[in-house]
Amino acid sequence: MKRTKFVPALLVGLLAFGVYACGGGGGAGEEGDGGNGGDGEEQVVEIGYSGPLSGGAALYGENVLDGMRMAVEDLNEDGMEIDGQPATFEIASLDDRYLPNEAATNAQRLVQQDGVSAIFIPHSGGIFAAQGINTDRNPFLLGAYSSDPAILEQENPLTMMIPPRFDNYMEPFTELQMERFGDRLGLIPTESEYGQEWTDQISAEWESQGGEVLSNNGIDYSETTDYAGPVTQALSEDPDVMFIGGPSQPTALIVEEARNQGFEGGFILMDQSKIEEMEAFTSLENMEGSLGVAPLSEVEDPGAEAFVERYAEEITEDRPAVSEVAYNYQSVHILANAMALAGTSEDPEAIRENIEPALSEVEEEYQVANFPDGFTEEGHLAGEVLAVSLEDGEFVPVEVPQMQ
């Protein structure tokens, strides 16, 4: 079995080109190569990843990949057997630049060339594209890191949707911000499929609660660098609340521009945007009145505090551990335990059937962010939903009902 290892000094260069591969040949075993069903020799289990590692969403993609890498480090340190064989886990990753067609192409390549049986994709466009091919001739389990509830509507039998559905947030976010700031909602969302779905749903909820939705000034968050124009257009309609969001960095720059132009209202942030990450690009004072997902510092899972500290030590102190790091971290642990229970790293159907029982197999120290309490028939890792409102510089918890 081919194994390619890169020394740390090379990783920076590879990431600059948006491609990182932590291993060669996949987990599919051939006779005598250490695959499943052998004589106890080590097997190498590749887990695939396709996501943005370049462009405006690169930081978001790196966060997901960092969480996966940290989990793989745990698994290899602890040791795990699958069908009686010691298993070594590795990540095979490719940059898709946030493009759905490239995500699908990458998925086919990862399955055919690297032999992976599970691929994590962190954007809805890529997930939908992958759902069109993952049950065909080369099936694979799809680790879907997007909160778009439409992912579950596809009735794809090989999907594991990871984060909370974003339709959880619509009613409480609308009620709170309308009460605090007023009933006129301005829109500057990201124009991805995920962004369009969020926009449609928050607009419908806002109107259902008696508010007025202003014009849509959506932009491509992965490509746009000058936000003055869309912000000026949105503010010309005198909104009380601004609905914005996509990757954290461009979202923060929109907040900065809006405050510079005199906006004093509140913000509703899509769940891809993280307040604690945005703080690196604009002040917390600028984000006053923002409503979004809870930082890990507000999470009470058993392993949360230690995970945040470890991230700072092993990955970087320059930016915080955010939920996409943590959710994908614990999801790789869930996946590996499902493989162990299934007795195979190669059969995606058998692995998916064991996701529910695998939840109770994950050690508490690896439960770091709203660890799921169930796996739905539709394929969702369902659990608690936490959000916060930034009020007077403090995070105020917001109760969010859980939708199934």
Image (cartoon, rainbow, N blue to C red):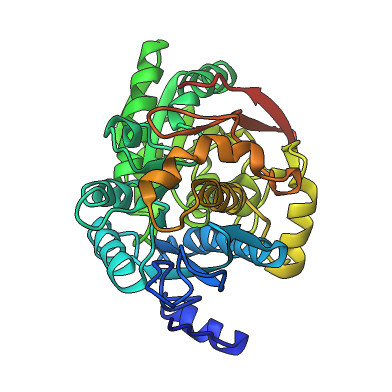
> Camera-side residue: 222 or 115?
115
Residue 287 place in picture, x, y as percent: 62, 42
Name the side, left or right, on which 319 lies relative to 237: right
Q: Position of residue 376 (x, y in %)?
A: 45, 28
Q: Which of 45 and 97 is in front in this view?
A: 45
Q: In which quarter of the image is residue 294?
A: top right
| Observer-nearest of 73 and 221 | 73
Q: In this view, does 108 lie to the left or right of 227?
A: left
Residue at position x 26%, y 34% in the image? 154
- Image quarter (top left, top right, bottom left or bottom right) of the N terminus: bottom left
The percent position of residue 87, horizontal first and vertical second, equals 57, 66
Residue 193 lies in quadrant: top left
Say if 120 sits above or below 39 in the image.
Answer: above
Give above or below for 392 relative to 115.
above
Rendered residue at 22%/52% (across/down): 133
Tell me: residue 11, above or below residue 315: below
Specify the quadrant of the image occupied by residue 370: top right
Reply above or below: 224 against 134.
Answer: below
Q: Residue at x 48, y 83 (%)?
A: 3
Q: How many labels does the image show?
A: 0
Is residue 219 visible to us here? no
- Location of the C terminus by quadrant is top left
Residue at left offset 76%, top offset 48%: 365
Q: Residue 324, image x and y in percent?
A: 55, 50
Asked whether 189 or 316 is in front, the reply is 316
In the displayed structure image, the side of residue 259 where residue 93 appears, left or right: left
Q: Do we see residue 305 in this rendering? A: yes
